[in-house]
């Protein structure tokens, strides 16, 4: 059972990160964003989940490209 909770915690921590960042960008609660993705998934038979994965991928690429550097010598 301990392995199950470790896996569950991992996916909750990584999965909710996308919702939190989208909510911060839009200025709304993360709960509303997560609920919207759930409803979209049921209504459109997977489109919401595909959109969620696309946004997670896009945010990851953005983080890799745009890193904040404190000085010129961090290159």
Image (cartoon, rainbow, N blue to C red):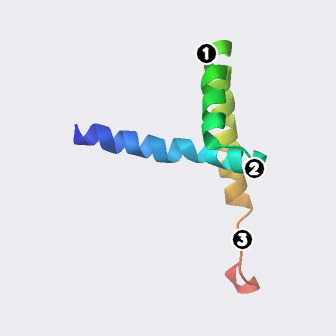
Secondary element at tag 1: helix
Q: Is residue 38 above or below residue 6?
A: above
* Residue at position x 69%, y 45% in the image: 23
Task: Check disc 3: other Cα within 10 Å, few if <14, some if 14-19, many if 20+.
Answer: few
**In this rendering, which labeled residue sits more in front, label 1 or label 3?**
1
Identify the residue shown where x is 67% and y is 58%: 64
Q: Is residue 27 above or below residue 38?
A: below
Residue 1, given in percent of the width and then of the height, sits at 22, 36
Q: Which residue is mark 2?
A: 25
At a point 76% along the width and 84% down the height, the residue shown is: 72
Left/right of residue 29 with respect to residue 2 in the rendered view: right
Residue 34, relative to residue 66: is it above or below?
above
Few, some or many C-alpha atoms within 10 Å of disc 1 (few <14, some 14-19, many ≥20)? few
Residue receiving disc 1: 42
Tag nearer the camera, 3 or 2: 2
**Residue 68 image label:** 3
Structural distance between the alpha carbons of marks 1 and 2: 25 Å
What is the quadrant of the C terminus in the image? bottom right
Q: Tell me the distance, in whole angstroms, between the alpha carbons under discs 3 and 2.
A: 18 Å
Side (left or right) of 4 relative to 43: left
Q: Are marks 1 and 3 in contact (CB under 8 Å)?
A: no
Secondary structure of the residue carrying numbered label 2: helix
Chain-order first, disc 1 or disc 3: 1
Which residue is at the front of the view, 35 or 67? 35
């Amino acid at each position: 059972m301990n392995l199950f909770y470790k896996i569950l915690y991992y996916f909750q921590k990584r999965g909710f990160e996308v919702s939190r960042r989208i909510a911060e960008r839009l200025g709304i609660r993360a709960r509303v964003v997560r609920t919207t993705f759930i409803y979209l998934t049921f209504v459109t038979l997977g489109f919401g989940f595909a959109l969620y994965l696309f946004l997670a991928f896009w945010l990851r690429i953005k983080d890799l490209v745009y890193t904040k550097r404190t000085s010129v010598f961090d290159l």
